Amino acid sequence: MTSSTKEIEQLIGKEYDKGFVTNLEADTFLPGLNEEVIAALSAKKNEPPFMLEWRLKAYRHWLTMTPPEWAFVNFKPIDYQQISYYSAPKQSEKLKSLDEVDPELLDTYKKLGIPLEEQERLSGVAVDAVFDSVSVATTFKGKLKEVGVIFCPISEAIQEYPELVKQYLGSVVPQEDNFYAALNSAVFTDGSFVYIPKGVRCPMELSTYFRINAANTGQFERTLIIADESSHVSYLEGCTAPMRDENQLHAAVVELVILDNAQIKYSTVQNWYPGDKDGKGGIYNFVTKRADCRGVNSKVSWTQVETGSAITWKYPSCVLTGDNSVGEFYSVALTNNYQQADTGTKMIHVGKNTRSTIISKGISAGKAQNSYRGLVKVLKSAENARNYTQCDSLLVGDQCGAHTFPYIEVKQPSANVEHEATTSKISEDQLFFCQQRGLSPEDAVSLIVNGFCKEVFKELPMEFAVEAQALLGISLEGSVG
Amino acid sequence: MASAVSSLEKYLEEYDEIKSTLPGQGLDWLVQLRQQGLDQFSTQGFPTTRDEDWRYTNVTPFIKKSFQSVLAKPSTTVLPEQMDHYYVPDCWQVVIVDGHFSNTLSKLDGLPEEVVVMALSDALIKCPDKVKSYLGQAVENEDHGFIHYNTAWFSEGLFVWIPQQVKMKQPLQLVHVVTQENVATATRNLIVAEAGAEGVVIESYFGSQAQAYLTSSISEVFVAENAHLTLYKLQNEASKALHCSGVYSQQEKHSTFNYLDFSFGGLIARNELHVNVGFAAACDLNGLFVGSGRQHFDNHTWINHLQPRGSSRELFKGILDGRARGVFQGCVKVFEDAQKIDSEMHNHNLLLSDNAEIDTKPQLVIYADDVKCAHGVTVGQLDDASVFYLQSRAVSEEEAKNMLTFAFANEMVDQIKVSSFKSYILALLLQKFPQGGIEQEWL
């Protein structure tokens, strides 16, 4: 037992391998936030006037708000005047193709395992890469345009498709929604914009990689995906950041709009820098993600693998407005050392015959705190709504915590709601069984944990599933008690 | 907001008038304790929906009515025959009417001499030191307006002390009755089972007809090493009453505490049940709430596993008809180094009408790794296939639904180990099916 614990600890002790810094000349605002900064930012982005107004409205409302304190996380209050709200790798002209992108930048993405140009050729995944505050490259644009799919940085969409942006931006997550969403609405710099036209099944998977590079910056990205009637898209998101001793803020907003008979599958592998083993540094990941299933028979599926960030505050939600719409949430959240995660989902059943499934797997190791917080709300109009929730926690080590805070509110008698939760440690019997068959302790642990998360991993697209499993192995190695 | 403040002021003004009539005058420690309660109450007031633990239960409009605290002496006399239907057969009875102990109505014949059962006001005179070592101990870490209110205002209560190794032969029933309209009663019960003792206590709350009043009741329960205590609670208040009660239990090692709650009455009823489980101690907490009309039931349970090897089981069932609303909030907290905990929590709810609502919030807060903790919640309605099956056997639809609903509830009634109390509850439960069709014969 003790020997296996030791090996596991070594495994856990493996360092964050995405923690390098790229030396790029950057165009960065001085820290501080006020209306001028927002105006400057809007001007920098060449935005039409309606966006500036939209941002200022959010900012003025944000000033009246206080940060939420109900989450099960501890951190020193953030000084929002110490953050720089814009940082971009310096480039002279707008780039025409990938060849013109700073080679050092491309190198960075290569190190991260996202060779943009190769990916374009080989894997058939269209990639939008966001570096600090701006989107640096989007691949496969041409091919996507042929079928009418718009996949571009949101800053570009604001200029080129203002009507679409005007109609949908903030319609799922309003500017006043919550403290971090309001801040994001005021200062968001870039992100991805996707529009899938009627009846189109997006021919390839779309993907965005987020990277925070500059120090003392916050990253505020905004993603808006619209799936028009009878369309389908699968979208992937990955994130990394360099190792720094100070904490950095990442407050993103993701809005998904799903119309009649459309489907969106949204997968995230979040691997922001989690801080060192003493809890120093790391990203504060305060994200608002929400999908609005507006149309009948629409479907949204959130899959997330959360292994990074010092603090995660994230509740991808589904508003099931359309009749027969379906919401799914599959999550693996792993915390180690001093990481804290308060994550879960909200399922709001509005339409008839709406269905939702929640599968949440929390793994807590070291001195970490891992909480599941979820809401299942069935409104009076949601006849025959159906929900199944399962949230399991695995504890690795005796100094960590695993917590479950589900809220279930049912106002419709024909609804069927089920909730199950368990918390336990890795069974010694299972470990023994594996070891007895010749597996090393860490292989046994990895096998059992992967089995524990299997229900979620099988929802991930192929490439991500492999990455997620490897990530889990790295983050967890050495942690079974 | 302004009105809430003014209603709080009314309560505070009134306190000055009744202060001198409350029991325990001249006991410095108690005067101090009450003052602390009052200070906290005057700063906090009653809880509002802005408090996380009260988010589903809004007592503010009700509290605004500012009920009158009952005065030192009962203003009406209750005849023993009026009480008959409150008594559970084969039990010793202690009766509190309108917040005051009634000696004539209580029945304690044959109670073993070594067992102490008396009104709290008597105990404060006869054995104040003993009371001092328990009063307020189990609610020390609790913090909301109703608790502070109760500490400052309590006028009476039940004091039970079962000495070491004594096993009570029959249950003790606390009969709490309110006969007046628009009154507020506050009672504090202390139930102590010393090492190796065994006992069964039934707390029962009644009111007459359709009166509005406030019942605030707190029971502090102490179960010492190897002691076994069972507490049944029946809440059958009048239809417009606000019932706000709490059971706060401290369990020492190898003890067991069984709790079974039946909530039938009242307009708004809030039950708190907080248990600290000691080393290798076990607790079993169960409840049934059956609501109709505009009734509102809020069950708030909290289990602290402070020591290793404890176990806890919890099952609450709700049946909601009409515009009734049910709330279940349960938390199991396992502290650091409390290893080998085995805990299970379940909440099952049946919604019978279009306007019924249930809000449920089961929580796990775990700081130890070698534990087995689980919770499960279901919300649903009667199974159509089962109803159809019965109908195909020539049972009318209404009767079939009643049978299935009754069966759902009966699982909880079956857990009662005192046969006289079981038949008593069964009779009350059957009254909840006024449409008929529930025939005693198939029970």
Image (cartoon, coloured by chain):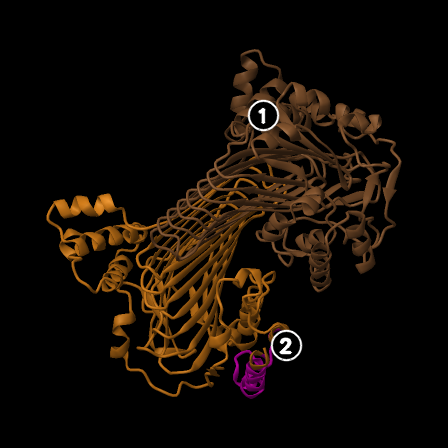
Chain colours: A brown, B orange
What x and y, as percent, mark residue B97?
38, 78
For residue A34, side relative to residue A379 (left or right): right
What x and y, as percent, mark residue A236?
61, 33
Q: Main secondary structure of the magenta part?
A: helix
What x and y, as percent, mark residue B270?
45, 65
Amino acid type at mark 2: Asp
Amino acid type at mark 1: Ala
| Dot label at residue B414 | none
* B234 or B56, nearer to the observer: B56
Q: Secondary structure at mark 2?
A: helix
Q: Tag 1, which chain? A: A
User: Quarter-wise, where is residue A388 in the image?
Assistant: top left
| Dot label at residue A465 | 1
* A202 or B183, nearer to the observer: A202
Counting every numbered tag in the picture gives 2
Residue at 30% x, 49% y is B411
Toward the top, the furthest residue is A438
Q: CA distance from mark 1 to mark 2?
A: 68 Å
Q: Secondary structure at mark 1?
A: helix
Residue at 60% x, 44% y is A343
For residue A289, side relative to residue A80 (left or right): left
Q: Tag 2, which chain? A: B
Q: Which residue is mark 2?
A: B28
Tell me, yes or no, if residue B105 can be seen here: yes
Tell me, yes or no, if residue A392 can be seen here: no
* B324 or B181, nearer to the observer: B324
Q: Is residue B229 magenta?
A: no
Q: Which residues are magenta?
A: B5-31
Q: Around disc 1, counting alpha carbons within 10 Å, would you say few (fewer than 14), some (14 to 19), or many (20 or more)? A: some
Q: Is residue B8 magenta?
A: yes
What x and y, as percent, mark residue A77?
76, 54
